[in-house]
């Protein structure tokens, strides 16, 4: 039996934050099968978890491809493992992933993820990306992964970030795997604001992106002279992300709420993989 859950991450209010599907699988399934399930779920990310001798194996898929790191689906996974009693609520969780071993712990209702830090490097303006996003940033930075380049664009005011209307078809023509846009906050509720665009992996705008804060936390920690920060991702759904910069690691914290649960009935179709 493959159990399937729909979870809203980085929120404790249903229908806010970032939705993810979490699928607990008991048998081996091909990457192609997981990709088909992710496409069927049609959410920005579907997480697949399976019990292993050293904890749990975790893989993430968008509707178009597998990704090497995903924050909100990891948070949703940890939430389900504790909520369903698969792991004692007092115990931490170890997850084996393409980004190495990741851990999750709880602080009250807040789930704390331990992720690798991604320090961006300054780079020259990329006019094709600026035109696709719709405004020129004050600073352009990038982080190169084995799967492509992540751009981080800083703007001078929060209202600019909120008002951007990217041309996603044009953004697909650039070398960007994803683009993070950000600015300092105009509010006392959070330190910085961001949005995340990734049409190259099938996500025009992600509601709340944990992995982008692997770049944002060290970036704003250095600029603001703070170790502990709060980010707000200004999508239509919106969500708060608690961050703690710890050198080569970043702690990312948030809450989650289960929306639905059920069973994925696929065994009789497995010959079509």
Image: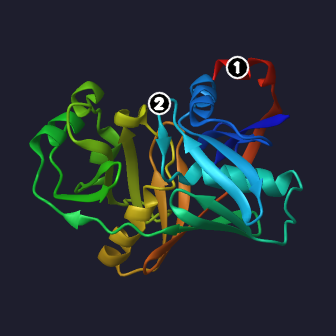
Quarter of the figure that contains the N terminus:
top right
Query: What residue appears at the point 21 percent right and 28 percent down from the top-left corner?
Result: 170
Query: What residue appears at the point 84 percent right and 53 percent down from the top-left corner?
Result: 83
Q: Of helix, strand and loop, which one carries label 2?
A: loop
Residue 12 visible in image: no
Which residue is farthest front? 271
| Residue closer to the observer: 136 or 59 | 59
Task: Say if mark 2 contacts mark 1, CB within 8 Å.
Answer: no
Q: Position of residue 258 (x, y in %)?
A: 77, 42
10 shown above or below 171: below
Q: Of helix, strand and loop, which one carries label 1?
A: helix
| Residue closer to the observer: 61 or 111 | 61
225 shown above or below 229: below
- What residue is shown with label 2? 64
Tell me the CA gap for discs 2 and 1: 21 Å
| Residue closer to the observer: 66 or 126 | 66
Q: Position of residue 71 (x, y in %)?
A: 55, 54
Number of numbered discs overlaid on the protein picture: 2
Q: Is residue 213 left or right of residue 171?
A: right
- What residue is shown with label 1? 271
Query: What residue appears at the point 77 percent right and 69 percent down from the top-left corner?
Result: 108
Q: Position of residue 271 (x, y in %)?
A: 70, 20
Query: What residue appears at the point 67 percent right and 43 percent down from the top-left corner?
Result: 48
Q: Is residue 68 left or right of residue 47?
A: left
Quarter of the figure that contains the C terminus:
top right
Q: Position of residue 145 (x, y in %)?
A: 33, 56
Tell me which label, 2 or 1, sits earlier in the chain. Answer: 2
């Amino acid at each position: 039996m493959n159990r399937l859950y729909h979870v809203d991450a980085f929120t404790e209010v249903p229908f806010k934050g970032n939705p993810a599907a979490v699928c607990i699988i008991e048998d081996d399934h091909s990457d192609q099968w997981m990709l088909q399930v992710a496409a069927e779920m049609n959410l920005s990310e579907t997480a697949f978890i399976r019990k292993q001798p050293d904890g749990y194996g975790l893989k993430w898929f968008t509707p178009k491809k597998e990704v090497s790191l995903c924050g909100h689906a990891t948070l949703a996974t940890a939430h389900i493992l504790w909520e369903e009693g698969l792991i004692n609520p007092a115990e931490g969780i170890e997850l084996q992933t393409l980004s190495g071993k990741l851990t999750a712990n709880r602080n009250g209702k807040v789930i704390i993820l331990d992720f690798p830090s991604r320090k961006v490097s300054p780079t020259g303006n990329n006019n094709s990306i600026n035109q696709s996003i719709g405004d020129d940033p004050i600073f352009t930075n990038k982080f190169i992964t084995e799967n492509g380049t992540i751009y981080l664009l800083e703007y001078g005011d929060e209202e600019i970030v909120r008002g951007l209307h990217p041309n996603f078809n044009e953004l697909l023509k650039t070398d960007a795997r994803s683009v993070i846009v950000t600015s300092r906050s105009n509010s006392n509720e959070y330190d910085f604001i961001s949005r995340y665009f990734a049409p190259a992996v099938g996500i025009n705008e992600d509601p709340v992106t944990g992995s982008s804060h692997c770049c944002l936390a060290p970036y704003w920690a250095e600029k603001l002279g703070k170790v502990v920060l709060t980010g707000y991702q200004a999508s239509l759904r919106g969500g708060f992300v608690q961050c703690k910069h710890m050198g080569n690691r970043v702690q990312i914290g948030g809450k989650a709420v289960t929306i639905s649960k059920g069973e994925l009935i696929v065994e009789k179709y497995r010959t079509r993989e």
